[in-house]
Amino acid sequence: MDLEEGAPVGLALNSSLAPTRNIEILCPVNTDFTQWFLPAFYLVVSLVGLLGNGVGLWNLCATSRKSGWNALGVLVGNLGVADLLYVVTLPFLVSYYLQGRVWVFGPGWCRLTRLLFHLNLYASIGFLTCISVHRYLGIVHPLKMLGRCQTLSPSVSLSVLVWVWVIIQLAPDFSFSKMDRAGVRCHDTTHHENLDTYLPYILTITMTGFAIPFLIITGCYCHVVVVLRKNQNVDPILKRRSITLVVLVLVLFSVCFLPYHIFRNLNLQSRRWQLQGSCSQTLRNIYVSYQVTRGLASLNSALNPLLYLMTSEELVVRLTAFGHTIGWALRFLWPNQAQRHLRQKKLSIMVDEECEEVSNGL
């Protein structure tokens, strides 16, 4: 087994000079699951994410030409850009796994592909946090939102700050080697000899990039729910949309982000245990679970476009009209049996009437 995505290494503490071929023998893990699960998952995410974010950004640009950009639209637009930067790399990963984990696109593109995954991950968390705080201020402190918080300058400055902060957090990861010595594998983490440095870095970025934003979002939404329950004068549409946004963001964190961060750290720690000579079914299960959470983490790029539906009434109207158009087109092209029977009956009546007119004329 290779070390890609943090696969268990199973080396004894004093076996640093052991040949690499002994790794699979000492603690083998069945990687067949990864071979079909990740490419299938990535393919679906790339198609849905590309379509959803493409339509969402198109709608934002079309709306901005009419009424101009708003503060929330800037944040959602940056979230869409982060998703698009990631989904365009997924076809390369699909090819990588379908070819038996053989990377043919060069070490530079390997580093960039892995970097864009984490860039999307932490930029998504950052902008979801900003969107949550924005909604919190709009509901809990509406008077503040009537002032400077509704102008574009704070949102633009905040967006730049999020991108800079994410890049600063990810800069150390770019220095860790991603390709193996043979130039075949494209690692998601790094070589096992770098674990003593890599694990503390990952623990730090877990706190700064995930745990702290998650606490901020949880605090904001708990307060939002309390205010919405107590205040009976809130617009029902705003109330429904706000609660839906709370549910969506919490689902994103619970399904996409939380499991990934838990099992990434567990997997790195399990590799350290294996370097000390440990090998058990639990460690193998941690590796397999980590692969599943990597797929779930990528799913946020396909779920984030739902935010466009909650922040843009025009998109809902356009999609509804488009759906009706498609429905009428399908009915016209492929009419059901009842419609065909009705048309045939009308045609038969018309033919009978014409024949009767001809006979009367004779």
Image (cartoon, grey):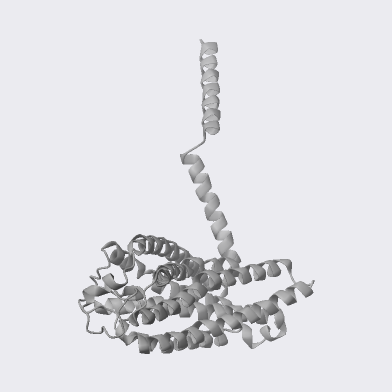
Q: Residue furthest top?
A: 362
Residue 308 on image: x %, y %: 55, 68
Give coordinates of residue 175: x percent, y percent.
Answer: 32, 87
In the foreground, 99 or 329: 99
Q: Assign the N terminus to one quadrant of the image.
A: bottom left
Where does the image place residue 57, in percent across and percent down from the top left? 48, 70
Q: Residue at x 33, y 64 (%)?
A: 30
Q: Is residue 59 left or right of residue 229?
A: left
Compared to residue 34, the image places residue 343 above or below, namely: above
Give the number of callouts: 0
Quarter of the image for residue 289 reads bottom left
User: 200 or 269, which is in the foreground?
Assistant: 269
Corner quadrant of residue 250: bottom right
Res. 197 in view:
yes
Residue 119 picture location, percent across and down: 42, 79
Q: Please report the residue visible at 55 percent of the width from the left and 87 percent of the height from the top.
A: 153
Q: Nearer the viewer, residue 13 or 295?
A: 13
Q: Is residue 130 visible?
A: no
Q: Is residue 206 left or right of residue 196?
A: right
* Image quadrant assignment for residue 218: bottom right
